[in-house]
């Protein structure tokens, strides 16, 4: 097998390195410090995707100032007009879908079919939010008093700060930016340092759709240098973060000090229950997709499979056989089923959990090793990994790994399965495979999570329903659908007294 002699892929011999600047007040600008960082392909680190600005507090301040100026005008643009720009952005994204998907596979590593899905999710979000521009419903209610009118209207919150993750680099940026601008807010976004390009691509589509300068500003860089000052900035009224529970605790604490709106979408350790009566073929297919899709790097990844004893043996035999055959590689190759970890640190975390699982006494049945020979030499690859006979209290069954490591746990019955499923600190997604409608409904009621799937794995949320979870997964907000409109608006109750006299609420009563 070739090692050092691997041919340099054509796109790597391109000497033109793309430099991406910050986007502030409609201009592409260097970071004030002049510092930059590299964005490299996790499947092949010889591939330099681009150079991005390593920004700091001063860049954040400039971006917030621009957003503040833009807000004065943008909030007065009628919401249906604002929404039309988002609709046009959807059409532009459709035209550029293939280009942006390829960019995303290069910077993030997930396979092309999935990056096409990620861009599609931004398109779906744009169409949905464009429709919201013509709704933004609020209650109009009868007043208690005569000749008085009462209603509540949605108002923009103001300047919104956004901190996005690397695993869904365009979709999750769209979940935040698109409802925010439709609602009349202006934004400063810090994309994940591993995958900034996809946010740039989304914002480019928005700008080409006619979004005025300053409405969306991008400041690239690292959490402590950009995310923290953004969350601390006195003029920022809302912060929306998708990331780890650890970072969520910090950002939530900062936001609380100045009473900012704060939406946190954090970790998961999502269970998929397989009962004795399940369609086993379907459950195996679903468990592979949920566990190893996106290399297990979804907050909603199926990281625990809880299987009833009657089908346990049959399930694991077939699941492991299939997991061993998954094709790992560079996501630009259409035949590849699982890409690399996002970076070396994540790969090391994944591998460390393999050791933790072994030491805890779980049985490693498949994978567990780094892949670093031949075609894998320049990337952060590992084998799809499956542990069986996992005790629900083991760390590999409790902690979010964010990699291709699946823990299979045996259970006695539905009640026991739900107890195991709920016995973690997170509550994002959950699923059950059963053909018994009574059991399905019991699970829908009793799984304590923000999302429950029946006869599907724990991944696959659509943009028009609420996305988020319970317990350490967040702070009660939801993205997607109407939840996003709730987050990015503030209620104003309006009373119009046209009686021409002072009417005292609760005191003057008309009998
Ligand atoms: C995530 O899990 O990190 O629900 C986001 C899904 C995608 C979004 C996932 N639409 O699988």
Image: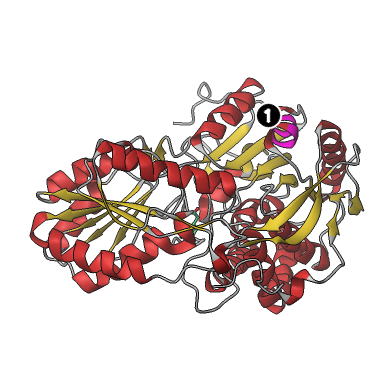
Name the residue rendered at 80%, 51% in the picture. Answer: 52
Give the side of residue 196 with respect to residue 278, left or right.
right
Residue ID for mark 1: 501
Q: Is residue 236 magenta?
A: no
Q: Is residue 151 visible?
A: no
Up/down of 424 relative to 27, above or below: above
Give the side of residue 378 with respect to residue 281, left or right.
right
Ligand 1 under 8 Å from disc 1 Cβ? no
Q: Does the magenta stretch include residue 228?
A: yes
In this orientation, which residue lies closer to the viewer: 93 or 134?
Answer: 93
Q: Report crowding for label 1: few under 14, some 14 to 19, many 20 or more residues within 10 A (C-alpha).
A: few
Protein image colouring = secondary structure
In this orientation, which residue lies closer to the viewer: 435 or 342?
Answer: 342
Tell me residue 193's x, y (percent): 69, 47
Name the residue rendered at 87%, 67% in the picture. Answer: 16
Up/down of 326 relative to 390, above or below: below
Give the side of residue 165 with respect to residue 325, left or right.
right
In this orientation, which residue lies closer to the viewer: 183 or 237?
Answer: 237
Tell me residue 417's x, y (percent): 18, 48
In magenta, the rendered stretch is 225-231
Q: How many marks?
A: 1
Q: In which quarter of the image is residue 122?
A: bottom right
In this orientation, which residue lies closer to the viewer: 326 or 59?
Answer: 326
Question: Could you tell me which secondary element the residue under label 1 belongs to?
Answer: loop
Image quarter in which the N terminus is found: bottom right
């Amino acid at each position: 097998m070739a090692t050092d002699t691997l041919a340099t892929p054509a796109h790597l011999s391109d000497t033109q390195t793309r430099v991406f600047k910050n986007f502030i007040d409609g201009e592409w600008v260097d970071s004030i410090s002049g510092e930059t960082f590299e964005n490299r392909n996790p499947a092949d680190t010889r591939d330099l995707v681009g150079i991005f600005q390593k920004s700091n507090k001063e860049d954040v301040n400039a971006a917030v100032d621009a957003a503040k100026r833009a807000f004065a005008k943008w909030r007065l643009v009628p919401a249906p007009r604002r929404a039309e720009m988002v609709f046009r952005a959807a059409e532009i994204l459709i035209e550029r879908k293939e280009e942006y998907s390829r960019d995303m596979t290069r910077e993030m590593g997930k396979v092309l079919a999935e990056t096409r899905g990620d861009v599609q999710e931004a398109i779906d979000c744009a169409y949905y939010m464009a429709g919201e521009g013509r709704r933004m419903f609020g209650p109009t209610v009868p007043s208690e008093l005569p000749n008085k009118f009462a209603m509540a209207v949605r108002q923009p919150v103001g300047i919104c700060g956004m901190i996005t993750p690397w695993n869904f680099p365009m979709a999750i940026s769209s979940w935040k930016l698109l409802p925010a601008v439709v609602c009349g807010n202006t934004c400063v976004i810090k994309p994940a340092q591993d995958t900034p390009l996809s946010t740039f691509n989304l914002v480019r589509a928005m700008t080409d759709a006619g979004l005025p300068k300053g409405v969306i500003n991008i400041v690239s860089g690292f959490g402590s240098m950009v995310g923290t000052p953004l969350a601390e900035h006195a003029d920022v009224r809302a912060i929306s973060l998708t990331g780890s529970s650890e970072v969520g605790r910090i950002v939530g604490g900062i936001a609380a000090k100045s009473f900012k709106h704060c939406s946190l979408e954090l970790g998961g350790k999502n269970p998929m229950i397989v009962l004795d009566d399940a369609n086993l073929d379907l459950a195996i297919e679903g468990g592979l997709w949920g566990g190893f899709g996106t290399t297990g790097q979804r907050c909603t990844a199926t990281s625990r499979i809880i299987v009833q004893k009657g089908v346990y043996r049959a399930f694991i035999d077939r699941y492991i056989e299939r997991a061993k055959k998954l094709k790992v590689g560079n996501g630009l190759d259409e035949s590849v089923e699982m890409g690399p970890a996002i970076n070396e640190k994540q790969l090391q975390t994944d591998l460390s959990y393999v050791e933790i699982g072994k030491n805890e006494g779980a049985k490693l049945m498949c994978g567990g090793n780094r892949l670093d020979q031949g075609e894998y030499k320049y990337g952060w690859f590992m084998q799809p990994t499956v542990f069986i006979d996992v005790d629900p209290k083991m760390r590999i069954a409790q902690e979010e790994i964010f990699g291709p490591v699946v823990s299979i746990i045996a259970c006695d019955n539905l009640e026991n399965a739900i107890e195991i499923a709920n016995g973690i600190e997170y509550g994002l997604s959950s699923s059950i495979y059963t053909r018994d409608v009574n059991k399905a409904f019991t699970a829908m009621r009793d799984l304590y999570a923000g999302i429950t799937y029946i006869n599907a794995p724990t991944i696959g949320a659509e943009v028009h329903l609420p996305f988020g979870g319970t317990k350490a997964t967040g702070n009660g907000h939801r993205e997607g659908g109407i939840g996003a409109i709730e987050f990015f608006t503030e209620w104003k109750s309006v009373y119009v007294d046209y009686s021409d006299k002072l009417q005292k609420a609760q005191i003057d009563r008309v009998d």
